[in-house]
Amino acid sequence: MLSYVLDRFKSSIVVLFVVSFITFFVLMIIPGNPAQLILGTDATPEAIAELHAAMGLDRPLYQQYLSWLLDLLKLDMGRSYVYGESVTVLIARSIPVTFSISIFAMILAVFIAFLFGMISAIKKNSIADYFSRSIMQLGAAIPSFWIGMVFIVYFGVKLKILPVSGFVPIEQSFAGFVKSITLPSVVLAIGEVGTLLRIIRSSMLDSLKQDYMDMARVKGLSAGKIYIKYALRGALTAPLTIIGMQFAKLAGGTVVIETIFALPGLGRLVLTAVEHRDIVLLQGLVMFITAMVIIITLFVDISVMFLNPRIKKFQQGEL
């Protein structure tokens, strides 16, 4: 187990290094002068050249990369051109917003997907199964931005029961916090339910066909114990992996939803960095999101190993 974690840690370091290399050089060779963007079109060539040199952009690219990498190891991601603040501070300020809606959305999506996915598998080809598969299709087919606009018009403008923009920190008002993340979280959950429900249904159907399920029925175990303790546990591997991937995707920045609901999260930061060609901010965001995805993936893999002993033995070379 420890050797597996160490191997994954080593590979993660390699991935981070490769991503840092690609991110830095691809963004730096994009046409356009950051100094020109900061000073505007009315700036004189002398002022642009002076700022260009002050930002260290006149040095060779490899020197800029090494300097940036060393600062990155010290958790210093530089200063944003647009905001004039530390990138680390900007990211830390945005994390609670994105993580709040992502966690709430995943909890809601997991609850709905497991509930309908299990019922759909147990009652195969029944009305409940057809209803669950309809939810699966709708969740995957309807664009999130359209659902978001419908929710804003109906719940925010017509009924006026939930705010349609902004974020209220939990320490400021718990009720306000819940209200501010409800609509965006529900919209995100709807988009994730379809994929997760399909995986849970297929995994449960496969688990129900296994020999140990026949043994459990022969022993006369209750339906709850058969489906929860045996069938569901055997079907958790694929859903957990998908849940980890979905959460990593959401936590990495929900650009469309955060833009629609005017939420100051990581997605909005990414959009601002791209629009204004804020290279320093974009580099920091890419590295942070990459590191976060790696950590979440590693956590999910370890969790799956604990839940499924066969995978653990395979990783240890016993199978």
Image (cartoon, rainbow, N blue to C red):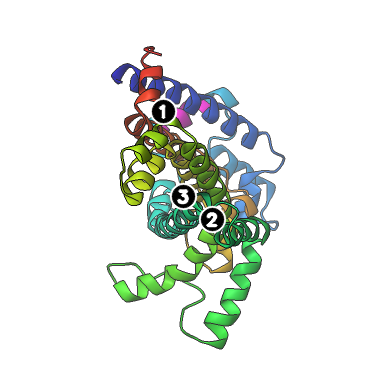
SS label for mark 3: helix
Amino acid type of the residue tagged 1 in the rendering: Leu
Q: Position of residue 83 (x, y in %)?
A: 49, 56
Amino acid type of the residue tagged 2 in the rendering: Val
Pick whichever, 170 or 135, lies toward us. 135
Instruction: Please tell me which residue is depicted at 53% across the width and 60% down the height of the picture.
Output: 188
Instruction: Please tell me which residue is depicted at 46% across the width and 84% down the height of the picture.
Output: 161
Tell me whether circle 3 and circle 2 mark residues in contact (CB < 8 Å). no
> Picture quarter containing residue 151?
bottom right
Q: Point out which mark residue 193 bears.
A: 2
Q: Point out which mark residue 70 bears.
A: 1
Q: Could you give the CA–CA distance between mark 1 and mark 2, rounded to whole angstroms? A: 41 Å
Q: Is residue 111 shown left or right of residue 40?
A: left
The region drawn magenta spans: 64-72
Marks counted in the figure total: 3
Tell me whether circle 3 and circle 1 mark residues in contact (CB < 8 Å). no
> Picture quarter containing residue 305?
top left
Q: Does 107 appear in magenta?
A: no
Q: Is residue 190 visible?
A: yes
Instruction: Please tell me which residue is depicted at 66% across the width and 67% down the height of the picture.
Output: 146
The kind of secondary structure the magenta stretch mainly shows is: helix
